Amino acid sequence: QVQLVESGGGLVQAGGSLRLSCAASGRTDSIYGMGWFRQAPGRERDFVSAIGWSGISTYHADSVKGRFTISRDNAKNAVYLQMNSLKPEDTAVYYCAVRTTPIVSTRLPSSSTEYHYWGQGTQVTVSS
């Protein structure tokens, strides 16, 4: 099993920045991909960003492309989400997730069903 703990959420004004962190523990040697999702009240959990094991391949949702950057530090078993130019519509609970089976597609996984372990979430609130 893999345990995930997110941190870094908070309240920020529109146009501001936040950096989310996710620390993995347990069977971290089984991690093939890591991702971030978010869920706003009354909405489904949406894909935000994903990164492959090497950290070279990344994939972002169109809604955050150019504003958010995902990165990982395998030595620390951590993944990060740098969020710049935040908008009120970015307000949500942000979840870290990992995939523990090989990624066979050329595209990084972007569906919640393609991930196997989840963190408890961290709240991000962007005020206008």
Image (cartoon, rainbow, N blue to C red):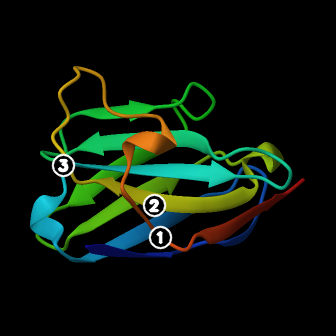
Task: Residue type at mark 2: give it.
Answer: Cys
C-beta proximity under 8 Å, tags 3 and 2: no
Q: In this view, does 11 lie above or below 59?
A: below
Mark 2 nearby-residue class (10 Å; few <14, some 14–19, many ≥20): many
- Residue 78 position in % (x across, y down): 28, 68
Q: How far apart are marks 3 and 2 (CA)?
A: 14 Å
Q: Distance between the residues labelled 1 and 3?
A: 16 Å
C-beta proximity under 8 Å, tags 2 and 1: yes
Which residue bears the numbered disc 1?
119
Q: Residue furthest right?
A: 128
Q: Which of the two discs, 2 and 1, labels the residue nearer the N terminus?
A: 2
Q: How far apart are marks 2 and 1 (CA)?
A: 5 Å
Which residue bears the numbered disc 2?
96
Q: Name the residue located 68 percent from the left edge and 56 percent from the top edge.
A: 16
Q: Name the residue located 53 percent from the left edge and 41 percent from the top edge.
A: 48
- Quarter of the image for the N terminus: give it: bottom left
Q: In this view, does 86 lie above or below 23?
A: above
Which residue bears the numbered disc 3?
32
How many marks can you see?
A: 3
C-beta proximity under 8 Å, tags 1 and 3: no
Q: In this view, does 128 lie above or below 78?
A: above
Task: Residue type at mark 3: give it.
Answer: Tyr
In the image, is 72 to the left or to the right of 38?
left
In the image, is 65 to the left or to the right of 54?
right
- Residue 115 position in % (x across, y down): 38, 49
Q: Is mark 1 on a helix, strand or loop?
A: loop
Q: Which of the two discs, 3 and 2, labels the residue nearer the N terminus?
A: 3
**Relative depth, front residue between 66 and 96:** 96
